[in-house]
Image: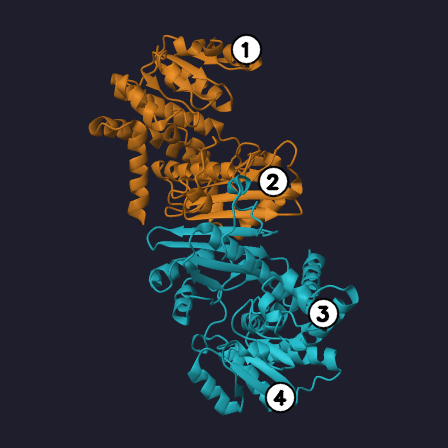
Chain colours: A orange, B cyan
Amino acid sequence: MEVTQVTPMKDLNPLFGNEAFMGHEQVVFCNDEETGLKAIIGIHSTTLGPALGGTRMWKYNNEMEALRDVLRLSRGMTFKASISGLNLGGGKAVIIGDASKDKTDDLMRRFGKFVDTLGGNYITAEDVGINTHDMEMVKSQTDHVTGIPESMGGSGDPSPVTAYGVYMGMKASAMYKWGTDKLEGKVVAVQGIGHVGENLVKHLTEEGAKVYINDINEDRLQTVSKEFGAEIIYGDGIYDLDMDIYAPCALGATVNDVTLQRLKCAIISGAANNQLADEQIHGKAVMEKGIIYAPDFLINAGGLINVYSELHGYNRDEALRKTENIYDTTLQILKKSETEGVTTHQAALSIAQKRVADHK
Amino acid sequence: MEVTQVTPMKDLNPLFGNEAFMGHEQVVFCNDEETGLKAIIGIHSTTLGPALGGTRMWKYNNEMEALRDVLRLSRGMTFKASISGLNLGGGKAVIIGDASKDKTDDLMRRFGKFVDTLGGNYITAEDVGINTHDMEMVKSQTDHVTGIPESMGGSGDPSPVTAYGVYMGMKASAMYKWGTDKLEGKVVAVQGIGHVGENLVKHLTEEGAKVYINDINEDRLQTVSKEFGAEIIYGDGIYDLDMDIYAPCALGATVNDVTLQRLKCAIISGAANNQLADEQIHGKAVMEKGIIYAPDFLINAGGLINVYSELHGYNRDEALRKTENIYDTTLQILKKSETEGVTTHQAALSIAQKRVADHK
């Protein structure tokens, strides 16, 4: 959501000419005067299947900010679905507005109607600023919704599946680095212990890893520490910890110029989105430091795999089984990265892109 | 398609913030790298029914030109359908490119696929730069096409229906002005004798009007003159003619500052789109000169009424019967204009807008 300089040429070609546009199939601007709804739906690709991606509500300063955000995110969904071997395309929606003030049931229902006009070409789900009640409103207008609660006939909380995928990516990274995927005795720092982080801590402690937890919520720290016997580490002391594995599961961009001076881990493998502040620069930097970086959009795809299963008659065991594939894919990518001398992010991206291209 | 100054605020809000946006429901940007297709579909309103409007292919200099064009045209379609009493909304599509160089069958087919993803929310038809063969390509991918040739199961050439509507609007204007709708002996100048103009000349000469014809095509002038006994008037001499009715059936914006100094008619009533160079300024100017102006978007709606009929099992008699209503609507608008002291264009627009608002 950064503000970039706009040149006159871009002004006259704000969409097709937008650098974030990058091969999108369709971008749909939706407007409803009665409810005040202003939304943008980005459909990057439907080559592998319907474009799936969550709806975010955010108080963007202007349309161009909203547009860049939705384009960037929908493109990311294409590659996430592709690398996960799902028959899904990439899409995303943003609603321009303050979720705490501008959101009404009517607005969400109207949004659902717009989603419905796309006839299943775009399938939506929850994202930042949107809650379960909102999705109920959307669902009242369209069937093209996923990631809904069990009470509404959906698959419920996807966090355990996401955490399991991250755990698989971490074990594969361990195998690549140390020749064994056993995490017993390894020091792992989990940053952010929301639902996903907590489930990851559970897997790690069960296997006998030495787990540190870090969060801004003191209550959560105490609860999780007590339940799993994890050690608390406060503030940004986590970056100086003598650890084997760093697992960012909260904020993005924690792998940056500053933290890379301090991080002493052998592996970075977590659930957070966009862990690398700059994919190119910091992707290269971790490689040069000999750190194994398991690409975030690959290993945190459990949630997407879960909602994909929901579309085809939900079965949690099957979702977990599919999520297990993250282990093999991570190994494949780490090998490709080393063989070709490219970052792991780039290796994952090119495999994802190739799968889409081959399908055309 | 004029270029307007863009200010920084507009740059950052090119769509929802665009002055041409004016209450659009949906604007869909479609892109296909393989065929080079770049299209914008504007859906102004679906309140009264699916948004119907033609597809235009044009070599716009930039996206903002294309966007302004499609937004302006799709909004116009809403009011045209509404004032005509049709259960249709307003839409329009533009394809960015040179119809003589960039158009391929694959490109048109891909466009048809995009139209299909909108699930009937938008129905397309021919417009500038698009021909019957192109529509065949579109039709191969979607059912949401209308205005197709008889050979393809459609309603064929709509020109006779359009001409009949203009004739009805002209007769109603005569009734309002002179207390009789008989055009026998009246001097009518028809500017532009394409299919619509020619059919109008036919009605007028059959009724015994004294018809002048004007066109840039000498062959057409000779043919139509011979067939219907119409008198040829060359060049812009038409604006100085001592006539009762001026019927612009070719270019738009022929009612402007220059021609209004010269026009001596009592009625302006023709088939051309956007006859008033500026709806406000020249709408008022004709009113002040005591000229009856039958709003173009109302009286040239026969073509739209015709394709509307096509959607519901085509019957030309029924299409003509519905087109006959243009007579009553024109009278209603001329009265409203006089009673409320507003231009006829404004009177028609407010009736059209009210019908949409009442339907919400």
Relative to residue B245, is residue B68 drawn left or right?
A: left
Residue ID at (50%, 11%):
A225
Callout 1 secondary element:
helix
Question: Percent position (x, y) of residue B87?
Answer: 63, 65
User: Mark 3 — on which chain does it sit?
Assistant: B
Disc 3 secondary structure class: helix
Give the CA separation, mark 2 to mark 1.
Answer: 34 Å
* Spatial separation of the CA atoms under disc 2 and disc 3: 46 Å
Q: Quadrant of residue B114?
A: bottom left
The kind of secondary structure element at disc 4 is: loop
Marked residue chain, label 1: A
Badges 2 and 1, same chain: yes
Q: Is residue A20 above or below residue B328?
A: above
Which residue is disc 2 drawn over?
A: A136
Q: Where is residue A9 drawn, in percent x and y?
A: 42, 44
Q: Would residue A173 be visible to someone looking at this image?
A: yes
Q: Nearer the viewer, residue A12 or B318?
A: A12
Quadrant holding the C terminus of chain B: bottom right
Disc nearest the viewer among 2 and 4: 4
What's under tag 4, amino acid-wise? Ala
Check disc 3 and give the amino acid type: Ile
Q: Nearer the viewer, mark 4 or mark 3?
A: 4
- Residue that label 3 marks: B333
* Residue denoted by label 1: A222
Q: Amino acid at mark 1?
A: Gln
Q: Position of residue B304 (x, y in %)?
A: 56, 70
How many residues crowd around disc 2 within 10 Å: few (fewer than 14), some, or many (20 or more)? some
Task: Give the residue pinned by disc 4.
Answer: B209
Q: Is residue B5 above or below residue A172?
A: below
